[in-house]
Image (cartoon, rainbow, N blue to C red):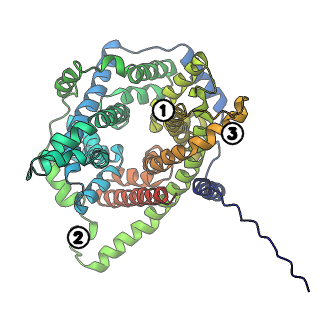
Amino acid sequence: MSSTKILSLPRYRWPGGVRTSLWFLLIALICLPFADLEISSLDPWSEMGRLLQGVISPQLMDSGLIFEALLATLAFAFAGVALAVVCGFLLALAFHHTFIRAICALTRSIHELFWALIFLQFFGLHPLTGLLAIAVPYSGIFARMYAEILGQVPKHPEYALPAGSGFFSAILYTRLPQAWPHLVSYTSYRLECGIRSSAILGFVGLPTLGYYLESSFSQGYYPEVAGLMILFYLLIATKKVWLRRWTLPLFLLGAPFFMGTGLPIIWGNVGRFFSEDIVPAPLRSGEANWQSLADWAGTIVIDQALPGVWNTLLLSQIALVVTGLFALLFFPLINRYCFGVAGRFPGHVFLVIARSTPEYLLAYILLQLLGPSMLPAVIALAIHNGALIGYLTGRNSNEIQLRPDAPERQLDRYFYELLPRSYPAFLSFMLYRWEVIMRETAILGILGIHTIGFFVDSAIQEIRFDVALLLILVAAMMNILVDLLARRIQRHI
């Protein structure tokens, strides 16, 4: 009786990054039937044609107003980021404490516009509103990133310090000099983000470029909209020209004088906001018992928080996958193995424009063209974040050295050489932006999309600040959980 030996071939397993991507794709496909992605505008093509005509023939309104708005945009950005750098660096030194990490996670998980809406209630249209709206969340962001940068430098130089030198001596004489180039590079990137945030603060009434953009667009003055957008793009694109070591002190010293004056702060309003306005309604009415407080919170969670969280998750997961597809499509535009120097120039221009356009502004424009639905938000989030990730992935792919047997045809080279070797970095960028996309999705509710920001804005309009604060905390917790999940997935793969 002869026995036959059955040979079993090893089962192929997809790489961890590919499996993770497929799971995200599957989740987005499941979300699609539940998302409102209809075009509800009566004649979007006609309106888009008018917008394109404005782009072809841009105009600028009164030069004095524009110059003041430009200075105010830079002033809020420089002052807010400078304050955040100082606070963030000090917090980074104590970032190993759980309490400090928790505070930083909470502050950075709340969008700048949410902070602006909070500060507006007691500071009004005062420079402090714009300054703190940028400085508070950016402090949490700087604390986390500075702590990571300082923690990644080699520790060996510390052994050369005299015994008993202490923690601060080690930071000052060993870690800081090594980490300085990375700290400067990241701070420069955050300044560019601060300029975008500063411009968007105009949508809540502060005298930055966003204020005049919203005014011109709402009145249908598309040539003025185009002129302001071109000015904004030039401001971002020429940052390396006007921001030098010798000009930086001038910007920092001049920033407080160009943020405007605003109305005087009524400090009684500040005290009332913290002592009454944000106190839950049952506690203000004297019903100080756990049952009434639970009923109040339960009603808000069921009627507002859960629908807002559901729509936020739907929109962000779809936008995340579309962002990834856009990034994979965009990054070859600036790859040296796909195009020559002249061929890469249009790609660089496109990516600069796309990543410099804030999601909020792009969503606002698309909502006017396509009507109120989730579709404008998905497109806006995908274009901005896809261009940013595409730029980072493209820059990373330019450092690849092709193998001797790399395909000659560009399409084959992309699929069999560049894409597999760039994919790990691409996925890291995607996981990092996941929490950012979730945060931006929440704030787009202010434009009328029924994410959690819609219910926050409605509560503020109805002067129910206790409800608004509870919903903002729900949004913050959601962002923190997504950030923790992204970090865990990153470690896993």
Q: Which structural element holds mark 2?
A: helix
Q: Which structural element holds mark 1?
A: helix
Q: Earlier in the sequence, mark 2 or mark 3?
A: 2
Mark 3 or mark 1, whichever is nearer to me = 3
Where is mark 1, residue-wise?
Answer: 355
Where is mark 3, residue-wise?
Answer: 415
Displayed quadrant of residue 157: top left
Q: Which structural element holds mark 3?
A: helix
Residue 125 seen from this side: no
Residue type highlighted by circle 2: Leu
Q: Earlier in the sequence, mark 3 or mark 1?
A: 1
> Looking at the image, which residue is at 28% across and 59% down?
102
Where is mark 2, residue-wise?
Answer: 283
Q: Earlier in the sequence, mark 2 or mark 1?
A: 2
Q: Are marks 2 and 1 in contact (CB under 8 Å)?
A: no
- Near mark 1 (Cα within 10 A), the count class, few <14, some 14-19 or many ≥20, is some
Residue type highlighted by circle 3: Phe
